[in-house]
Image (cartoon, rainbow, N blue to C red):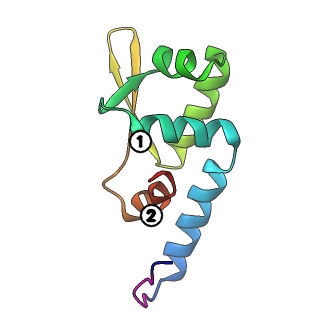
């Protein structure tokens, strides 16, 4: 077990982390986060995500919208294609992603 530094978190940090955990707390969304995290590509298209996970496109899009609203992923549009990337620039997101290592 790894010892963490004794960090003092502000209440607003705890609220944000709770929102992130709430958004991620679904098996399908966790699978999407794992796929994005382990991908060799920086961003994945919605089509790639639903094909790799064997899910329907509308369900994937709905879950990605929830993850985007929580600030866990960002969306890029190239023409008609939508791509999603992890927001790894936020400390709370990198803490969550340690789960997938």
Instruction: Residue at 49% x, 14% y: name it.
Output: 47
Image check: 22 left or right of 73?
right
Q: Gap in Å between the C-alphas at discs 2 and 1? A: 13 Å
Q: Nearer the viewer, residue 97 or 88?
A: 97
Give the image quarter of residue 66. top right
- The stretch in magenta equals 3-7
Q: Which residue is mark 1?
A: 37
Give the crowd class for mark 1: few <14, some 14-19, many >=20 residues within 10 Å.
Answer: some
Mark sitting earlier along the chain (2/1)? 1
Majority secondary structure in the magenta region: loop
Callout 1 secondary element: helix
Instruction: Residue at 67% x, 23% y: name it.
Output: 59
Callout 2 secondary element: helix
On screen, residue 67 above or below 48: below
Give the crowd class for mark 2: few <14, some 14-19, many >=20 residues within 10 Å.
Answer: few
On screen, residue 70 above or below 28: below
Q: Nearer the viewer, residue 35 or 44?
A: 35
Image check: 55 left or right of 11?
right
- Total number of numbered labels? 2
Q: Is residue 5 magenta?
A: yes
Q: Is residue 48 magenta?
A: no
- The x, y position of residue 54, in whole percent, is 63, 18
- The x, y position of residue 70, in whole percent, is 53, 49
Instruction: Residue at 39% x, 87% y: name it.
Output: 5
Instruction: Residue at 45% x, 59% y: name it.
Output: 98
- The x, y position of residue 85, in whole percent, is 37, 36
On screen, residue 45 above or below 90: above
Image check: 65 left or right of 45?
right
Give the image quarter of residue 4. bottom left
Q: Which mark is residue 95?
A: 2
- The x, y position of residue 25, in whole percent, is 67, 50
């Amino acid at each position: 077990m790894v010892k963490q530094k004794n960090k003092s978190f502000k209440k607003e940090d705890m609220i944000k982390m709770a929102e992130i955990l709430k958004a991620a707390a679904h098996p399908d969304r966790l699978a999407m986060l794992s796929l994005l995290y382990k991908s060799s590509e920086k961003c994945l298209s919605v089509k790639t995500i639903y094909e790799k996970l064997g899910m329907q496109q509308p369900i994937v899009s709905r879950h990605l919208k929830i993850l985007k609203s929580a600030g866990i992923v960002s969306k890029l549009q190239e023409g008609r294609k939508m791509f999603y990337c992890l927001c790894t620039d936020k400390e709370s997101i990198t803490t969550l992603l340690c789960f997938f290592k």
